[in-house]
Image (cartoon, rainbow, N blue to C red):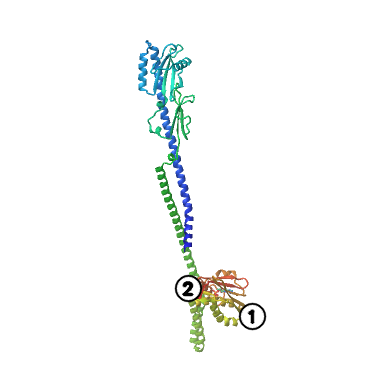
């Protein structure tokens, strides 16, 4: 029982395994698709935010150009050496634009002191002068040596070869890219701003991010390079809630699909079964109609002969009576009785074939039935001068059936064999052999008669198929019904040198099971 259960469980597991594997594959594909979707989303968000920031920085740096131009004009137009207006404007620029944290106006004549918002070390003043001298009209852009995150813009003023001043604007690069959007405060986001020569003003020297957006600021005087990056983590690709949601919805869909597929399979199987059943019943009906037709024509054929004889004898009786020859009447009436009995026998055999009387099956030894049949037919064999050899089994051969029916089967086969060799005189031989194994009991009847022609063989076991003058052709048909109802088989196994008929019945192991 335990072995049976574990086998059943194993078979169930085998059936489920491919479904589970497929489910895992479907889940993996769904997770992969979710990750790809999230990655694409992050990439497009980074590009969107990067573009916004780039536009903002471009706008801001263009303001620096405007300030420089305005301050240069004010410095050139100044009449007083203190440059009060210049300082005033510079102060308000610093107030409104905190990222601009120093503005200096340095006379190119090194003996004159400069004007600025903060005191300027002479080295730096010298650097501004040198840059303004070297300038051919373009703004000079360079890193602020004193402040790591700053850069300076230097322009000569007025912007001609007869320039009097070097004008300097210091910009806090970190403030330049400061942005309020929550995206930029995310820990995975990296931001870098560098000068065109690669000097990094803000951010790491390298941006080791998987996703990257890099663009130069659209400004001629400050073509700074803005680089933003995003380090993608598993949590970004597979956020917990969406992942759980996707996995559960995919599982539910998969389950629904499997159930639908299985139902479709069973509906198909049921439809096929229904079609086969319909076909089977149509065939069975056709075969019944066929058999009925054959039986009717056989019965008609068989009954015609005795009925014609009875009619002729009745007419003869009337003529004999008319002539007053009453002594002849008895003979004619006797013949009439014989023919009537023959007709009755035909009908009785037919009834037996079509509706055999069932008696309860019992377990019995086939050897006894064989012995009864041999004894019963011994006189007929002797009369025909036929030698009957009987090879039985040394041990009991139990089968479950009606013993009378099985005797009837054996009787039909043995009688047919004796009749088949009856005209051979002393050469005629019939062998009855009983054999078997643990599963079956085999009974064979063979003779050395003329055998069975192909034409007769195709009609064997069909009612009224006979080649004998007095035969009715019901013996084999009846035998087949009886053997099959006992769970056995009957057939012709040889027909070249005489005929060999075989009956196979399921063997019963012990007689203790004898019950009706
Ligand atoms: P019946 O004996 O009344 O003809 P059966 O059904 O017993 O009816 O047999 C049908 C036919 O099968 C016989 O007419 C005969 O032609 C053929 N047959 C049966 N047994 C043998 C046999 N041993 N040898 C030759 N022919 C046989």
Q: Which of 35 and 470 is in front in this view?
A: 35
The residues bearing labels 2 and 1 have C-alpha atoms spaced at a distance of 38 Å
Mark 2 element type:
helix
- Taking the image in four quarters, ligand 1 sits in the one at bottom right
Counting from the top left corner in percent of width and height, residue 494 is at 60, 70
Image: 352 above or below 164: below
Q: Within 10 Å of the Cα at label 1, are there few (<14), some (14-19), or many (20+) other Cα atoms?
A: few
Mark 1 element type:
helix
Query: Residue at coordinates 35% horizontally, 14% vertically from top-left?
Result: 85
Camera sees residue 300: no
Image: 6 above or below 239: below
Q: Nearer the viewer, residue 377 or 330?
A: 377
Q: Which of 54 and 173 is in front in this view?
A: 173
Q: Within 10 Å of the Cα at label 2, are there few (<14), some (14-19), or many (20+) other Cα atoms?
A: some
Camera sees residue 213: yes
Question: Where does label 2 land, which residue?
Answer: 354
Counting from the top left corner in percent of width and height, residue 270 is at 44, 58
Q: Are marks 2 and 1 in contact (CB under 8 Å)?
A: no
Query: Residue at coordinates 47% horizontally, 60% vertically from top-left?
Result: 6
Question: Where does label 1 land, which residue?
Answer: 426
Counting from the top left corner in percent of width and height, residue 231 is at 45, 35
């Amino acid at each position: 029982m335990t072995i049976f259960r574990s086998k059943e469980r194993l078979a169930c597991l085998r059936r489920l395994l491919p479904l589970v594997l497929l489910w895992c594959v479907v889940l993996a594909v769904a997770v992969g698709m979710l990750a790809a979707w999230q990655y694409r989303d992050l990439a497009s968000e980074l590009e969107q935010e990067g573009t916004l920031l780039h536009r903002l920085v471009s706008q801001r740096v263009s303001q620096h150009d405007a300030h420089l131009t305005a301050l240069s004009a004010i410095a050139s137009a100044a009449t007083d050496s203190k440059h009060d207006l210049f300082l005033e404007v510079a102060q308000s620029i610093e107030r409104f634009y905190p990222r601009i944290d120093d503005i200096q106006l340095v006379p190119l004549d090194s003996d004159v002191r400069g004007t600025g918002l903060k005191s300027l070390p002479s080295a730096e003043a010298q650097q501004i002068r040198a840059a303004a001298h070297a300038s051919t009209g373009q703004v000079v852009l360079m890193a602020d040596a004193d402040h790591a995150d700053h850069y300076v813009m230097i322009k000569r003023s007025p912007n001609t070869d007869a320039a009097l001043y070097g004008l300097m604007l210091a910009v806090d690069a970190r403030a330049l890219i400061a942005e309020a959007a929550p995206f930029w405060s995310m820990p995975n986001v990296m931001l870098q701003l560098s000068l065109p020569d690669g000097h990094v003003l803000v951010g790491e020297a390298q941006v080791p991010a998987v996703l990257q957006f890099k663009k130069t600021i659209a400004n001629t005087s400050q073509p700074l390079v803005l680089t933003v990056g995003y380090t993608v983590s598993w949590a970004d690709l597979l956020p917990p809630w969406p992942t759980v949601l996707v996995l559960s919805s995919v599982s539910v869909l998969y389950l629904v699909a499997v159930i639908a597929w299985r139902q479709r399979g069973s509906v198909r199987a049921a439809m096929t079964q229904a079609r086969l059943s319909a076909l089977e019943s149509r065939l069975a009906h056709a075969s019944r109609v066929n058999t009925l037709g054959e039986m009717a024509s056989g019965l008609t054929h068989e009954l015609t002969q005795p009925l014609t004889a009875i009619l002729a004898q009745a007419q003869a009786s009337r003529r004999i009576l008319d002539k007053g020859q009453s002594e002849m009447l008895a003979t004619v009436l006797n013949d009439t009785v014989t023919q009537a009995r023959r007709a009755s026998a035909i009908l009785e055999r037919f009834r037996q074939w079509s509706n055999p009387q069932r008696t309860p099956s019992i377990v019995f030894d086939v050897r006894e039935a064989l012995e009864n049949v041999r004894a019963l037919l011994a006189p007929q064999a002797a009369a025909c001068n036929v030698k009957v050899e009987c090879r039985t089994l040394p041990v009991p051969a139990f089968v479950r059936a009606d013993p009378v029916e099985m005797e009837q089967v054996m009787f039909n086969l043995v009688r047919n064999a004796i009749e088949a060799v009856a005209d051979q005189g002393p050469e005629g031989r019939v062998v009855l052999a009983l054999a078997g194994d643990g599963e079956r009991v085999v009974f064979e009847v063979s003779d050395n008669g003329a055998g069975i022609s192909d034409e007769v063989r195709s009609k064997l076991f069909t009612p009224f198929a006979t080649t004998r003058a007095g035969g009715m052709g019901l013996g084999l048909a009846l035998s087949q019904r009886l053997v099959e109802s006992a769970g056995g088989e009957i057939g012709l196994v040889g027909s070249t040198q005489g005929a060999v008929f075989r009956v196979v019945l399921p063997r019963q192991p012990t007689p203790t099971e004898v019950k009706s």
